[in-house]
Image: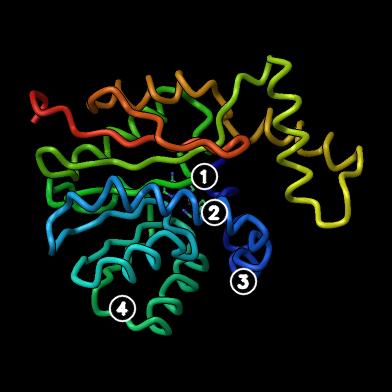
């Protein structure tokens, strides 16, 4: 039911999604710049799994940067995936993409990917066990020594630091100044619909899914990024 609601929400947002988040481009660009530095070790013809690819921003970045890589774009929202497909057509990398509309557990489970990206997705799994299972599903599809790059909103929401970070984050997102009701709405939504956990806890959930200890390589406001390698004795 919750999954269904989330899918409907992203289906509704798809057409306007890139415009809505355009102001966050400098943060996304910095995340991708650092992502590149951790992905340059991948093979010339790497296969990349993009989980919760949305409208395809990270896929498009990697496709442009690494012209021989192939991608599987996975997302339960058909509308988000449609925007991603259009982007692939417009930017000339459609032939290097496979699109899978659905959740990861419906994608064939072969250890065939050199790396995976999962940006701003796992935060929607409110149950910590489900979140670890989700990371396990990614691990099952990676080759030995495969790399996962994950990004999520993270913070200790009971801490004074969270209040400051949330205020700054919402200011960034509010083009005409931060109104108190916007802050309140965001605080309530983040407490109810998004699992914002302390960064160390998110790293712990990823590790519990069979990865080496995740390395936090990025933070901008509430957004954190980790990379990690598949733990080899699990294979
Ligand atoms: C906030 S958007 C992020 C999209 C893209 N990764 C980005 O950074 O721009 C989250 C995306 O994850 C998808 N999603 C939500 N829950 C998911 C799940 N359990 N598995 C895979 N994708 C999911 C949504 O449909 C949506 O397209």
- Foreground residue among 131 and 61: 61
Q: Is 125 above or below relative to 77? A: above
Indicate yes or no: mark 2 CB to ligand 1 under 8 Å. yes
Query: Which residue does the numbered mark 1 point to in the structure image?
Result: 3
Residue shown at the point (64%, 63%) measured from the top left: 22
Query: Which residue does the numbered mark 4 point to in the structure image?
Result: 93
Q: Is 30 above or below relative to 134? A: below
Nearer the camera: disc 1 or disc 4: 4
Percent of width and height locating residue 214: 32, 27
Horizontal side, residue 135 vs residue 12: left or right: left
The disc placed on residue 7 is: 2
The answer to whether the residue labelled 1 contacts the one labelled 2, judged by CB atoms less than 8 Å apart, is yes
Nearer the camera: disc 2 or disc 4: 4
Indicate yes or no: mark 4 CB to ligand 1 under 8 Å. no
Residue shown at the point (19%, 53%) measured from the top left: 108
Horizontal side, residue 59 vs residue 175: left or right: left
Choose top left, top right, bottom left or bottom right for residue 170: top right
Nearer-N-terminus badge (3/4): 3
Nearer-N-terminus badge (2/4): 2
Indicate yes or no: mark 1 CB to ligand 1 under 8 Å. yes
Horizontal side, residue 21 vs residue 104: left or right: right
């Amino acid at each position: 039911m919750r999954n269904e609601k989330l899918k409907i929400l992203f289906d509704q947002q798809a057409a306007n999604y890139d415009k809505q988040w355009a102001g966050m481009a400098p943060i996304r660009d910095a995340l991708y710049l650092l992502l590149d530095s951790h992905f340059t070790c991948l093979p010339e013809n790497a296969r990349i799994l993009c989980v919760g690819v949305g409208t395809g921003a990270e896929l498009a970045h990697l496709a442009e940067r690494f012209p021989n890589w192939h991608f599987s774009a996975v997302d339960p929202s058909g509308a988000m995936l449609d925007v991603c497909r259009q982007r692939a057509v417009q930017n000339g990398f459609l032939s290097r993409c496979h699109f899978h509309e659905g959740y990861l557990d419906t994608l064939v489970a072969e250890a065939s990917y050199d790396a995976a990206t999962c940006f701003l997705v796992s935060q929607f799994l409110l149950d910590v066990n489900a979140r670890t299972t989700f990371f396990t599903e990614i691990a099952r599809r990676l080759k030995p020594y495969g790399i996962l790059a994950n990004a999520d909103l993270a913070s200790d929401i009971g801490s004074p630091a969270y209040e400051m970070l949330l205020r700054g984050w919402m200011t960034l997102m509010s083009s005409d100044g931060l109104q108190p009701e916007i802050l309140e709405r965001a605080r309530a939504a983040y407490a109810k619909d998004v699992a914002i956990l302390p960064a160390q806890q998110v790293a712990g959930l990823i590790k519990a899914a069979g990865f080496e200890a995740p390395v936090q390589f990025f933070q901008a406001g509430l957004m954190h990024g980790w990379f990690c390698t598949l733990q080899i004795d699990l294979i």
